[in-house]
């Protein structure tokens, strides 16, 4: 009889209970927190919600790479910069739990998917899914991406005005549903229902936290739960359909359906549903926002695109430096630790921020400037280990990295083959940060037909970039 690794215990997802637990845990800490601002402050909490980048950079300037900030009801230890990132993500990663960090707030939608599990169950779930993200599979997905982008570009013409962010969002969802879960967008009803319910559920995290904790009829919570239940029904129906037909399918769902006790891992339908939701969630706004930020910067630096040696992959790397969508990585320490020479208690929230780490003035020269040449091979070698972490790192590096990079590459290359995009007059980028960073007001652009070839092909010929 194989040893079957069970999923983790159900955790309470009620925000008040989670807050009470945070407070109880903090009270039990008898050793000092790292230096910082530990008094309760409404201004600081608001500052963190509105402009966390500035708050984190100011604190780094005052206290160094490991510091404490009281946000809302609790002390959070933030760790920034190469050494601290390497500690958290690679050398001591096992000492930090995801489930007990703020990712736990995602459990009402994502359940026990990869973003909210630790230990053996996480390792085995990840192993079961990895084949979907191997090079050959990504190459297959790239063909599908090309088809979908061509279709989406169909009506584009000189002078067209559109919101690139929303255009990409719809496209990315079609690609994800088709490539990962075999949901056929041409089955219009099934696709429209799934896409709409998914967007309805996600909109919960774009609400201010104060609205997220409300319960009862008409609350964002209730709407999210209703959408999640409808999505569950779509996913379970698809699982049953496949089992009944005897054809489990050649996509991620098929792979997960085949995962049975012989592999030390018994995924129930509920676990499969959780992973489906997690991948859709983790891959959706990240990819979409990256495309929007990339074209925002290219529109401001048109000479780069028209230069003979324009390198899309360098521009993409630099975009992910300035605007890493998954900008914060929440954890909770298990045992006390020393991070970059600073003592950190066990059982407390510890978070890294790629966004802030990518803006440190002592690590990046002229950090606010968009300079793709930083990532040219000869310069790339100078970047310290742990300084650049848009996809996280270590054994929990983003599993969808190659998929996401391939998707952004294909979308951007296909657009640039035929068009240039101008920002609409008066547009000013405002960045929102929940659940990932993205352009708050979308990205309104005017499409210009371009005769200048970029020599980029359709974006499928190059290897996806390594982080
Ligand atoms: C440009 C696109 C993307 C970016 C910048 C990005 C970024 C990240 C980052 C930073 C993490 C680690 C978070 C942490 O350390 O706390 C992560 C994890 C993850 N990402 Fe992505 N992601 C992208 C696209 C995708 C796509 C397309 C998928 C799915 C198809 C995906 C699925 C996941 C999953 C499942 C995890 C959790 C992995 C684990 O815990 O083992 N991501 N991503």
Image (tube, grey):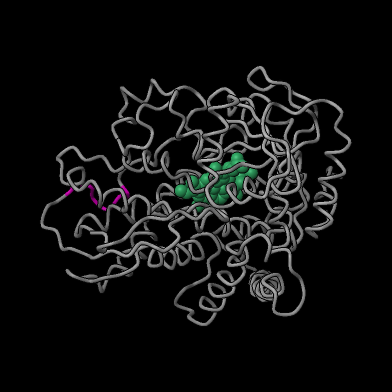
Kindly give the residue lying farthest to the bottom in the view shown.
189
> Would residue 230 be counted in the magenta stretch?
no
Q: Nearer the viewer, residue 92 or 204?
A: 204
Q: Residue at x 53, y 66 (%)?
A: 182
Q: Position of residue 370 (x, y in %)?
A: 32, 39
Q: Nearer the viewer, residue 218 or 190?
A: 218
Q: Position of residue 364 (x, y in %)?
A: 40, 27
Magenta-drawn segment: 454-460
Q: Residue at x 24, y 70 (%)?
A: 156
User: How many discs mark residues in the rendered view?
Assistant: 0
Q: Residue at x 47, y 32 (%)?
A: 388
Kindly give the residue lying farthest to the left in the view shown.
451
> Would residue 455 be counted in the magenta stretch?
yes
Q: Residue at x 30, y 50 (%)?
A: 459
Does 417 appear above or below 97?
A: below
Q: Nearer the viewer, residue 368 or 184?
A: 368
Instruction: Classify residue 298 as left or right of residue 320.
Output: left
The quadrant in which residue 31 appears is top right
Does 34 appear above or below 433?
A: above
Task: Tell me the quarter of the image containing the N terminus.
Answer: top right
Q: Is residue 241 visible?
A: no
Q: Position of residue 238 (x, y in %)?
A: 63, 72
The quadrant in which residue 206 appears is bottom right
Instruction: Classify residue 461 as left or right of residue 381.
Output: left
Q: Is residue 292 visible?
A: yes
Examine the residues drawn in magenta and state their main secondary structure: loop
Task: Tell me the quarter of the image containing the C terminus.
Answer: top left
Q: Position of residue 252 (x, y in %)?
A: 58, 57
């Amino acid at each position: 009889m194989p040893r079957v690794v069970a999923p983790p215990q159900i955790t309470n997802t009620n925000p008040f209970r989670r807050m009470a637990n945070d407070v109880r845990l903090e009270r039990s800490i008898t050793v000092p927190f790292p230096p910082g601002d530990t008094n309760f402050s409404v201004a600081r909490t608001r500052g963190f919600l509105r402009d966390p980048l500035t708050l984190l950079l100011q604190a780094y300037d005052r206290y160094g790479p490991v510091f404490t900030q009281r946000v809302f009801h609790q002390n959070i230890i933030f760790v920034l910069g190469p050494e601290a990132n390497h500690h958290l993500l690679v050398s001591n990663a096992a000492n930090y739990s995801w489930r007990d960090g703020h990712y736990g707030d995602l459990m009402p939608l994502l359940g026990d998917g990869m973003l909210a599990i630790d230990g053996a169950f996480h390792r085995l779930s990840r192993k079961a899914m990895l084949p979907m993200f191997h090079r050959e599979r990504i190459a297959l997905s790239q063909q599908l991406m090309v088809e979908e982008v061509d279709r989406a570009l169909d009506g584009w013409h000189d002078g067209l005005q559109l919101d690139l962010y929303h255009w990409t969002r719809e496209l990315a969802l079609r690609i994800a549903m088709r490539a990962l879960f075999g949901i056929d967008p041409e089955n219009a009803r099934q696709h429209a229902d799934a896409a709409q319910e998914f967007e309805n559920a996600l909109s919960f995290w774009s609400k201010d936290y104060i609205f997220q904790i409300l319960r009862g009829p008409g609350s964002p919570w209730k709407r999210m739960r209703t959408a999640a239940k409808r999505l569950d029904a779509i996913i379970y129906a698809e699982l049953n359909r496949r089992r009944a037909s005897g054809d489990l399918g050649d996509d991620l769902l098929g792979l997960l359906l085949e995962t049975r006790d012989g592999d030390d891992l018994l995924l129930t339908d509920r676990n499969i549903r959780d992973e489906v939701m997690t991948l859709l969630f983790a891959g959706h706004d990240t990819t979409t926002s990256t495309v929007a930020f990339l074209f925002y910067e290219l529109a401001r630096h048109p000479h780069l695109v028209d230069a003979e040696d324009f390198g899309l992959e360098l521009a993409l790397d630099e975009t992910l430096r300035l605007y890493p969508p998954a900008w914060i990585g929440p954890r909770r320490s298990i045992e006390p630790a020393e991070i970059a020479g600073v003592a950190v208690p066990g059982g407390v929230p510890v978070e890294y921020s790629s966004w802030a780490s990518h803006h440190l003035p002592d690590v990046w020269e002229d950090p606010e400037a968009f300079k793709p040449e930083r990532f040219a091979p000869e310069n790339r070698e100078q970047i310290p280990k742990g300084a650049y972490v848009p996809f996280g790192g270590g054994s929990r590096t983003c599993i969808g990295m190659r998929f996401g990079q391939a998707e952004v590459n294909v979308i951007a290359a296909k657009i640039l083959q035929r068009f240039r995009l101008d920002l609409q007059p008066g547009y000013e980028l405002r960045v929102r940060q929940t659940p990932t960073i993205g352009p708050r007001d979308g990205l309104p652009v005017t499409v210009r037909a371009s005769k200048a070839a970029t020599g980029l092909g359709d974006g499928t010929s190059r290897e996806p970039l390594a982080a």
